[in-house]
Image (cartoon, rainbow, N blue to C red):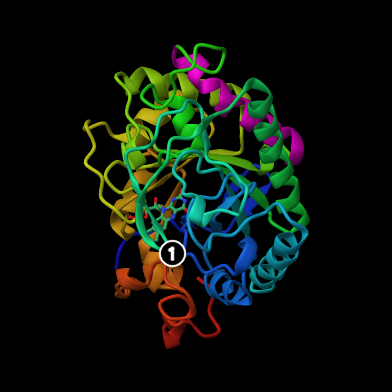
Amino acid sequence: MSDTALLFSPLRVGALELPSRVVMAPMTRARSGPHGVPLALSATYYAQRASAGLIVAEATQISDEGQGYMRTPGIHTPQQIAAWRVITDAVHDAGGRILLQLWHVGRVSHPENREPGSRCVGPSAIAADVKIFTPTGMHPAPAPHALTRDEIAATVGDYAQAARNAMEAGFDGVEIHAGNGYLIDQFLHANANLRTDAYGGDASGRSRFLWEVCEAVMAAVGADRTGVRLSPFGVFNGISDPDPAALFATAIRGLDRLRPAYLHVINLEVSGDRTTQAESEVDVARFSREHFSGKLMVAGGYGVDSAEQALQEGVADMIGFGRPYIANPDLAMRLRRGLDLAKPERATFYTEGPKGYIDYPALACAVNERA
Ligand SMILES: Cc1cc2nc3c(=O)[nH]c(=O)nc-3n(C[C@H](O)[C@H](O)[C@H](O)COP(=O)(O)O)c2cc1C
């Protein structure tokens, strides 16, 4: 059996006491009902996975403008907050801890997937070179409206309000989604951000929006309940930069000064459910560690041995598991006991209903035992 001594040791992260370093990574599953209201189904799904040291719930839009895909949940209306409360209660009743990932897709969006009247926005009016799945098929992402200074300030305010809403919904904290080519990542990258004001230009200008969102969310709910997720060197969703090393050194050092509870980084080549061809061979976790002195979570392609090794080598403090959590609700117990893992079925990653969502069984030996 594998050595899991560190993986199953407790860790304090900000205000959170984690029983293990096994984290369920945030995953969009497109199971929400109309108007971004999560369904009771999701309470079952997350409660089934409550033996994780921590759950980071799926990316959740902070406003109608922040939505890009079909059936994703929101955290900006009273109905959404009430529905999330059912989910956080179920996870807490099952002994777990759960954060909400705050999301604004920016230009990676299509009007067919948003509430009527809401706009597609971004740092500059440059369309992402991506196609978006909609009720009428795949369509190119349109050119976004370039946010004005006042609109940027309002968007920062939307993040803070969404964070407060998450606390009202019973979450233990929030994670700011600043990776994978969505709004904050669009501000960071030179090919999506041609602004000449304080939010563009050099790496620190392009990092300003990230830092302001982080500060606003920390002021709203506490630094000890705020995490940030980045995908340094990633090229997912059509972003690129001539000097990603300088960009992410600047962005991460600025976050380090702000001291959120943790930084979460995604290893190259495994963003979302696709494998992206990265331009660089950088070890993202080690790179991030050099520039960030707080708690570090890393996700992307981990199994029990590589996770334990990353912890033993001090590369990271927590390990995020994405796809393994889709098919193994009792993943923590399986890793601890060296049991086989079930394989997730890709075809049901983003489909409606219970199939491929809440019907992956826990192993019988998990009954009455929490890993
Ligand atoms: C179905 C699916 C949905 C995902 N949705 C999100 C998301 O909402 N937010 C996010 O930051 N990453 C998302 N990811 C990326 C995962 O959090 C994780 O980084 C990635 O799957 C790599 O980890 P793994 O190799 O353990 O699966 C998603 C991945 C998958 C497979």
Q: Residue 237: horizontal and vertical position, in percent?
A: 35, 41
Residue 161 image offset from top left, x and y in percent: 74, 42
| The residue at label 1 has a CB less than 8 Å from ligand 1 | no
Residue 209 is one of the magenta-drawn residues: yes
200 with respect to 38 (left or right): left
Residue 77: image location, x then y, percent: 73, 56
Tell me the kind of residue under disc 1: Pro
Residue in the image at 35% along x and 28% along y: 287
Q: Is residue 247 above or below residue 202?
A: below
Q: Is residue 287 among the parts visible in the rendering? A: yes
In magenta, the rendered stretch is 202-221
Residue at 48% x, 80% y is 354
Residue 227, picture quadrant: top right
Indicate the quadrant of ligand 1 in the picture.
Answer: bottom left
Instruction: Say which residue label 1 marks.
Output: 135
Residue 93 on the magenta segment = no
Dominant SS of magenta comes to helix
- Local packing at callout 1 (Cα closer than 10 Å; few below 14, some 14-19, many 20+) is few
